[in-house]
Each structure stands twice: as C-alpha cells, then as structure tokens.
Amino acid sequence: MAAGSLLKLDDYRQVAPRGAVDILMRIGERLRGRRFVHVSASRYGGAGVEVLNRLVPIMNDLGVDTTWEITIGTADFDQVGRAVTRALSGTEQVITEPMLARLHQTAVENARRLRLDADLVMVHDAMPLGLVDQRGSSGRWVWRCHQDLSSAQPQIWSALRPVAQRYDAAVFSLARFATPLSIPRFIVYPSIDPLSERNREMSRAEQAAQMDRLHVPRDKPILLQIGPFERLHDPLGVVNAYRLVKKHHDVRLVLAGPPPAPGGDVLSDVREAAGQDPDISVIVLPPDPQIELNALERAATIAIQKPLKADFTIEVATAMWKGKPVIGTIAGGIPFQMVVNVTGYTVETVEGAAFRIRQLLSNPEMIGRMGAAGREHVRRNFLVTRHLSEYLALLAHLTR
Amino acid sequence: MSPTAPFVFLGCLELNELLPHEAHDARELLEQLERVPVESIFCHTSASLLHRPVLAEAYPNDFALWVGTEVRDVRLAERLSAVDAFHAGSMERVREELVATISDHLQHLGGAPARTQGKRFRFFQMHLVPVPTGHQAHTLAELRDALAEVDVSALFYHTIEARYRAGRGRGDFAEWVAAALGRPEVADRLAHIDPHAGSLERIRDRHLSVLSDAIAQGGA
C-alpha cells in the first residue's frame, strides 16, 4: 500500500465510471473543512477497515479533514475483544460481566486519549463500540459494523445493543447482516481498490514470474478458490467438484489461502485429498500476498467461492474485476456481488459447482462474456470510488 | 431554475437506509406496502434504475423481481411488472396499484401464499445528496455535450427524481428546453423518452440522439 498511498483521486478517472470522479471532487468542495474521524481497534484485520488506508488520504485530498485513530488496550483487553467479536459472529463464547466491564473501561481510557471532536465520528466494529459513552454534545456518531450480526450470541448482543443505540446511526455491509436497532441503519457495501497491488493491471511477464514463483504451471485452464483452509470454506468440496470436472476436462485446481490458525484447520486433509494429483496446487500464501493473489486471479479461468458460511467475501468482486466468471454459494455477500447467470452462477452443492464449471469450460465464449459483464458490474458497484461517495453522502446527510 | 438561467447539471450521491419492514410472502408484502413511507415505493420502483445491473433484470421493479425469483410466483410477478411507476401519476398511486394487484391475487389464490425459499424482501429508502457536476449549458449543443460527460447520477436526478418524486414537470431537461430555449417540440421528444429503456446509460443515449437530431435540423 506504500506506493498506492501516493495516489490521488484523479488517478481513478481511468477506471471509475464516467463522471464519478468529478462528482466526488464537487462534493469534496461542498464538505471542505468538515472533520471526519474514523476509529478502529487495528489498521489491519479485514478489507472493511483496511480500505481506510486508501479512503482517508483521498478524503483529505478532497479537503475533508479526515483522521484515523486506533484504540489501544492491554493483552487481556485484546482477548476480550476477540471473544466478543467471535460471539457477535455466532460462535458461542463465555463472556463474563468483568470482561464486559474491561471492554467499557478500555473505551473510557481511549476516549480520554484520542481526539474525537469532529463533525462525524465513525467507529468501526465492536471493540471500540463503547467510545460512544464518552461522546460530547457536538458532532454525529456512527457505528460501522463490518460483521454479520444475524446470528450473534443473544446474551452478548443484549448487553451491547443499548451501547450501539447511543449512536446516531449504524452502517452495515449487507441488509442480511443487520440486526434490529432503534437508530437509522444504512447499508454500504465493501469495495475493491482497482489501483492497489491486489487489483492493478499486471503485465503478462510479471504474471508469469509470479506464477512460476508459486509453482503453478499455466498449461491448462485453472480453477481457483482463494480462502482460508477452514471447513467453513469447504476446500474439500472444491476438490470433489474438481474431480467431477476432471473426468471431462483437463484442468488444474489451485486452492490458495493464508496460513491456517492452530487447531481445527483442514490443510492437512486438503493435502491428503489432493494426494499425488499434480494438477492440484495447494498454496499457503505469504504475509500480505497482494501481488500473488493478483497474479493467481488473472491466471485463473474460473473463480470459485464455495464457503458454507461467509462474510461479505469481497474476493468475488476482485475476481470479477479481472474478468473472471465466478461460481459461488449463496453464503454471506457472495450472491449480492453477482448478477446470477450474467456474471456467474450460484450453486448449493458440489455437483452444482461441477456442472456449472463444465458448462463454462464447454462454452468458452461464455467465459469471456460473463467475465466482461462481471468487470463492468464491479466498475459500477464495487469500486472504492463508490465506497467513498457513500461515506461522503453519510457525512453530508448526517451533518446537514 | 428561472427561464433565462443556464441549465446547471446536478448529480447525486445516494445513501440507502434499511427500514424496519420486511416480508416473507405476498401477504406480508401487501401489509408492509401499506405501511412503508412513500419514498420506499420510489426506491423499489423508479429508483431501481440506479442499480440496474449490466443486463436488464427479468422484471422492472424490485417487488416483481423478488416475487418472481425468491417466492417463485411467476403469475404475481408478471402482474406486478405491469404496475408502471413512470405513468401512474404519483408514488401514492403506485402504492395503491401495487396493493390492489397483490390483494386481487391473494383473493383468487386457493391456499396460503408461498413463502420465500431464499431472501426475504427488505424495504429500503434512499436519501439523495444533490451535487453540482460543474457542467452548465446555455444552448442545445452545450446541453448535449455536457450530457455526454456527466456522471450517470445526473441523468437520474434530472429525469427520474425530478419527474417521478420531486414533481418537477416533465423532468428538468424537457422543462428547461421548453422554457429557456423556446423549443417545445424538442422538449416533447425529450419528455417522451421511455424510462423503461433498460438503463440510465440507454436513457442518456436516447437524450443524446434527440438533441443531436434537433441540432442537425434546427440549429444549436
């Protein structure tokens, strides 16, 4: 992101929809001098927060005085925060009153330390949620929840809901991730940065060099799933779909994901399932693998996203941006990024995935057509410029 | 906009608010349609043009689309498709037509309405933040040239929003061409561009065609 942070909004003219950058510059003029503060518990840990690396400089470039504050806490606070995050995602946790008190106390301490006077304060995710208890009388406060709260652990959410309702509004990534609240709820989809290392154009030579480094030959059509080696992402199901396809088409399967967390991962099962098949590549990605992912997605023929449960899964949009048809499940945000039967297919089973892959491989003109439609769909709906426009609309709407 | 003023192009940013109304079947859809703010009806009918994907959907409004693809009641979906938000006269009238269509369908249905097998219908309302695009026009030629350049949201703001929600006559382009340029025949042609063209880009293309023809025939 280092080189990318030098980018200006003007650079996006080459990729954004016609006129979109002009509108952003004009709204920037209107909002010039207003102060917008983002607060999160980390600068990393999800596309929803990491996009601020790009949004914050551009907002400042536009004249909106924007800062990004990070809360700090002790190790035990981090542990509580992670447990709360897991509970809100629906994984049963034991969270005690003292743990919730720790969360609150850390918020109080951070509120004293951070500069939170602004026209709009946007607090990202659950860990800094309690900052709102220290809000002053001026400025509007918005809770930006990147998580899916639809199956949150009830007793934990019952404790946090009153805190969330002290905000002026909440922003969710999908309607299906939202939970009932007494405050206005807005929906802002995550986005991809088309000029980032992950998504920028890449020469064939650079792509080939990356693929060689990852030891992936480019001699056959490549089916690609990017995602954690966890049961919820069903890499074994993807291997089974590949095997069904392999009876009819000579293809290669690439499964790429970050190093698995200790315990409960399925990497060894995937490696065992891959067996001695030289056409299956199981790639454990290095830290910050933006260029590697860019090369893999560009080399792929068809992108697969077959999680059983998922968050927004912005990887669908990143693959579509590179002109790839996507075969995905209906989990999380996957179907909301696709135009079904136009940019790809939704499936519910291994057999369904295999059928759609075969259908595409047997009709290669469909691959090109769907890929082109997907790129255009992403251009209109999932670029960072759209994300920026919605945050600025929120600033204008709430501080009018 | 006074008759002698230049045409000032405004685009718009949008913000989508999720309302506390949702439906799992046609009966719940009917109940909620009677309760939601009229802005939500606009959001799911005329304004769905703003989100139209690269290829037109099978149905022209969100209600028909949901009934057709999630509830799989094609008969009702087809009937809801026929509710024309662009010719109803007002959004309240659109609401009445939607309610009447679903009520009639339910009356003639043998049993309980089918429930969605997938997504529930969630009602939204849209907040628009108008923004000057920086483009102005004093003549037909300038109007055409700017129209070719502006963000697609300006098309939405000056045609769909102006005409079907804000009640600004036949839309801002037609009104200005008639009043400021004294070209009622061109205004008529602009006002008759079918919003069902498929997408805002197609609506843009049709405006450009009308303006180019008018310039070729009668000067800029």
Image (spheres, coloured by chain):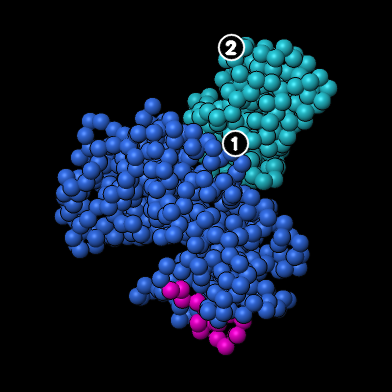
Chain colours: A blue, B cyan
Decide: few, some or many residues near mark 1? Use Cα within 10 Å; few <14, some 14-19, many ≥20. Answer: many
* Left or right of B15, for residue B206: right
Q: Which residue occupies the extreme right position in the image?
A: B217
Amino acid at dot 2: Ser
Inspect this view and state whether residue A5 appears.
yes
Q: Residue at x 70, y 14 (%)?
A: B181
Q: Secondary structure at mark 1?
A: loop
Residue A354, by quadrant, is bottom right
Residue A385 percent across, percent down from the top left: 51, 45
Q: Earlier in the sequence, mark 1 or mark 2?
A: 2
Q: Quadrant of the C terminus of chain B?
A: top right
Q: Amino acid under label 1?
A: Asp
Q: Are marks 1 and 2 in contact (CB under 8 Å)?
A: no
Q: Name the spot of residue B39 as percent of width and height, x first.
A: 52, 26
> Which residue is depicted at the point 76% across and 68% down?
A362
Relative to A130, say whether A195 is above or below: below
Q: Position of residue B206 (x, y in %)?
A: 75, 31
Residue beneath label 1, please? Answer: B151
**Image mark for residue B2:** 2
Quarter of the image for the N terminus of chain B: give it: top right
- Looking at the image, which residue is at 31% across and 34% down? A119
Asked if residue A285 lies in the magenta stretch, the reply is yes
Q: Is residue B109 visible?
A: no
Q: Give the chain letter at badge 2.
A: B
The reply, left or right, for residue A72 in relation to residue A345 is left
x then y, percent, for residue A176: 47, 47
Q: Residue at x 46, y 73 (%)?
A: A285
Residue span colored magenta: A271-286
